[in-house]
Image (cartoon, rainbow, N blue to C red):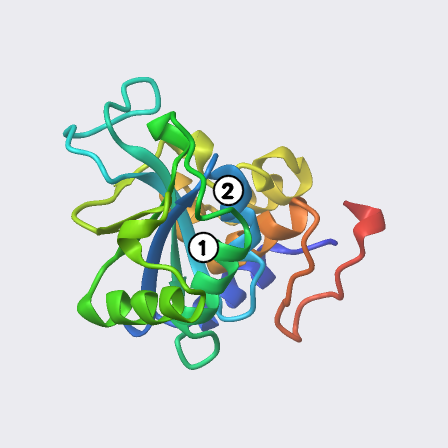
Amino acid sequence: MTLTQTQIREYDRRAMDSAETATATFGIGCFWGPDAQFGAMDGVVRTRVGYAGGTKLDPTYHALGDHTEVVQVDFDPDTIPYRALLERVFNSHNPQHQTRKTQYQNIVLAASEDQRAVLDELLTTRGLTADGIGTRIEQLSRFYPAEDYHQKYKLRSVSSFMDTFEAAGYDDDELRESPIAAKLNGYAAGHDVGIAEELPVPDRGTV
C-alpha cells in the first residue's frame, strides 16, 4: 500500500471527532497485538496502549508497579457497539484462566455504569459472573499512556509508512491518536482493514 502525506492528513481530518466517540479499555496480554487487532476493526476510530488497573502513580514500562498493560479503543457506537468489542475480548482468551504476572493479565475496565451493565449482561448470557471468573472486572480509575515506542508498534516497523507520517509533520502524540495510524497498524500486523474510498486499495505485496 502506498500513501501520500495528503491522504494521511485528509483521512484523519475527516475522521469522527474524539468528542463523539465512546472509549473502551481492556487488557488481554501484551498490548501490541490487541492494539493492532482492534485498530483494524470497522467502527474503531483511534487506539492507544498504556497502563491501568493499579495504584502506582505515573507507571512506566520498566517501573510498572501493580498496573497491567491495556489497550484503549475509541469507537463509533453506531457502527460497532460496546458489546461487540467485549465479544472479541472474551473470544480471545479463556476467562476461567488468569496469568499470574499482573503485567499481562486479562482485565476489562468499565468506564461507566452503562458499560458495566452491558458487561454483566454478556457474562450472564455465557453463564458467567464477574466474581466467578479469572478475568479481572474492574472500574476504570485512570489510564496512563505507554511510552511512544509502544504506540502503533507494528506500524513503526514499516519504514515507508513512517516516512510518510514524518513527512506529513506528525509527532509522536499525533501518531498515537491518528485514526489512519490505527488502521495501518492493524494492516502492518496482517489484519484486513477498511480504508476510506479515497485511498488506494490495500495491496499486501507492496508492504
Asked if residue 44 is positioned above or below residue 174 in the image, the reply reads below
Q: How many marks?
A: 2
Image-based side of 51 in relation to 42, left or right: left
- Residue 153 in percent (x, y) is at 53, 36
Callout 1 amino acid: Ser
- Residue 31 in percent (x, y) is at 46, 39
Label 1: which secondary element: loop
Label 2 crowding class (10 Å Cα cut-off): few <14, some 14-19, many 20+? many
Callout 2 amino acid: Lys
- For the residues labelled 1 and 2, say whether their Cβ atoms are less than 8 Å apart: yes
- Residue 84 in percent (x, y) is at 47, 69
Asked if residue 17 is positioned above or below residue 99 in the image, the reply reads below
Alpha-carbon span between mark 1 and mark 2: 10 Å
Image-based side of 140 in relation to 83, left or right: left
In this view, the residue farthest toward the right is: 205
The residue lying at 19 percent from left, 45 percent from top is 142
Question: Looking at this view, is 86 or 40 the one in front?
Answer: 86
Quadrant in the picture for the N terminus: bottom right
The residue lying at 33 percent from left, 65 percent from top is 119
Q: Is residue 85 visible?
A: yes
Asked if residue 192 is positioned above or below residue 22 in the image, the reply reads above
Mark 1 lies on residue: 178
Image-based side of 134 in relation to 187, left or right: left
Q: Which mark is residue 152?
A: 2
Question: Looking at this view, is 41 or 119 the one in front?
Answer: 119
